[in-house]
């Protein structure tokens, strides 16, 4: 069952990426990002209210949000800052780059997690994992060659640096999650709720500086149904992922690999919807990245 839950998480992540591309295309990035996070927070808010009004019921259905000390709030706020910066960079890049370029680079996130696991947690990679490591590097290099045909030069395009930076920060947050959940013993739904709240507040502060004072940007902003859909789909993906991890037989390495199948939705379906170029050629490095990720995650 946990594998099917992982596939559901991958499905919602893939749909989340498609909606995100539609939401930011030709639109103001910061209010779009704020709207998506706010929608996710509003989806989680009833959990918090239920935990206060009827804690017994919240515990019975597995949605109870526990009270935590101030120090743990500080740690969660750090995670919110990291992810807010990651999302700002990712949304800006997604606005200016094809989804068939952005999503595969984002899918190489396990590469950064792989490095972090070696340096921070002293994990020792196997020979197979090293093969996967270099396969990802080579596949990203192939993407740079295809991107040049679309006028996207990896060395000089600032949005490529933005998406790589976003991927690095996202992977750093993933490593930080291990500390929050294992060392601080935070419940997933508790972490999810407070993280959304603090990220909403951070992005509201960004809007107060960059968006609200600027009349032209306010007029340029277009509300689309995909804006709240992005936040809702992301929270649903997280929910199914957390439910899968509740199974004592669930293997996190296999679950992570299953969730990477979201890239197929973004590249294949996204390429057709947004009519992007060189879709068939992008399938070759796409397979390379997926194979590299699989070698890293499946290796024992």
Image (cartoon, rainbow, N blue to C red):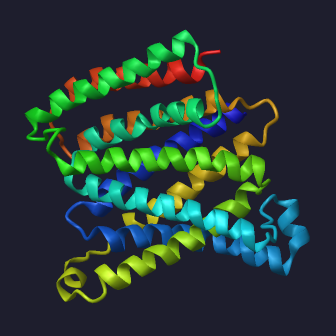
Query: Where residue 276 sits in the image (x, y, percent)?
Result: 18, 41
Q: Is residue 40 visible?
A: yes
Q: Is residue 224 visible?
A: no
On screen, residue 127 above or below 151: above
On screen, residue 266 above or below 86: above
Give left or right: position of 158 versus 21. left
Look at the image and tell me in which quarter the C terminus lies: top right
Which picture quadrant has residue 297?
top right
Q: Nearer the viewer, residue 282 or 187?
A: 187
Look at the image and tell me in which quarter the N terminus lies: top right
The residue furthest top is: 127
Residue at 76% x, 46% y: name it. Answer: 182
Total marks in image: 0
Query: Where residue 225 sits in the image (x, y, percent)?
Result: 37, 68
On screen, residue 190 above or below 98: below
Q: Nearer the viewer, residue 142 or 58?
A: 142
Residue at 78% x, 43% y: name it. Answer: 246
Q: Nearer the viewer, residue 207 or 56?
A: 207
On screen, residue 37 above or below 201: above
Query: Where residue 138 sits in the image (x, y, percent)?
Result: 31, 20
Give left or right: position of 166 versus 299. left
Query: Where residue 286 sits in the image (x, y, percent)?
Result: 33, 26
Residue at 23% x, 50% y: name it. Answer: 159
Which picture quadrant has residue 210?
bottom left
Give left or right: position of 238 versus 224. right
Give left or right: position of 156 versus 253. left
Residue at 17% x, 84% y: name it. Answer: 216
């Amino acid at each position: 069952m946990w594998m099917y839950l992982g596939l559901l998480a991958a499905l919602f992540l893939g749909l989340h990426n498609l909606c995100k591309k539609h939401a930011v295309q030709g639109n103001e990035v910061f209010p779009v990002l704020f709207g998506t996070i706010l929608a996710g927070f509003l989806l989680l808010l009833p959990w918090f209210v239920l935990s206060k009004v009827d804690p017994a019921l919240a515990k019975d259905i597995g949605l109870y949000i526990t009270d935590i000390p101030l120090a743990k709030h500080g740690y969660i706020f750090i995670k919110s800052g990291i992810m807010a910066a990651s999302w700002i960079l990712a949304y800006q890049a997604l606005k200016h780059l094809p989804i068939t370029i952005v999503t595969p680079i984002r899918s190489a996130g396990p590469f950064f997690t792989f490095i972090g696991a070696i340096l921070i947690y002293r994990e020792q990679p196997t020979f197979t994992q090293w093969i996967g490591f270099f396969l990802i590097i080579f596949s990203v290099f192939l993407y740079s060659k295809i991107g040049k045909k679309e006028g996207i030069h990896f060395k000089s395009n600032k949005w490529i640096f933005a998406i790589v930076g976003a991927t690095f920060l996202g992977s750093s947050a993933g490593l930080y999650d291990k500390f929050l959940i294992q060392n601080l013993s935070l419940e997933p739904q508790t972490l999810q709720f407070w993280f959304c709240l603090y990220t909403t507040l951070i992005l509201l502060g960004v809007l107060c500086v960059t968006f609200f004072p600027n009349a032209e940007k306010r007029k340029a902003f277009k509300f689309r149904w995909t804006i709240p859909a992005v936040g809702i789909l992301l929270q649903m993906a997280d929910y199914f992922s957390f439910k899968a991890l509740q199974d004592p037989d669930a293997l996190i390495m296999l679950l992570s690999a299953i969730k990477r199948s979201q890239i197929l939705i973004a590249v294949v379906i996204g390429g057709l919807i947004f009519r992007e170029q060189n879709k068939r050629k992008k399938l070759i490095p796409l397979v390379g990245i997926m194979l590299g990720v699989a070698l890293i995650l499946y290796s024992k």
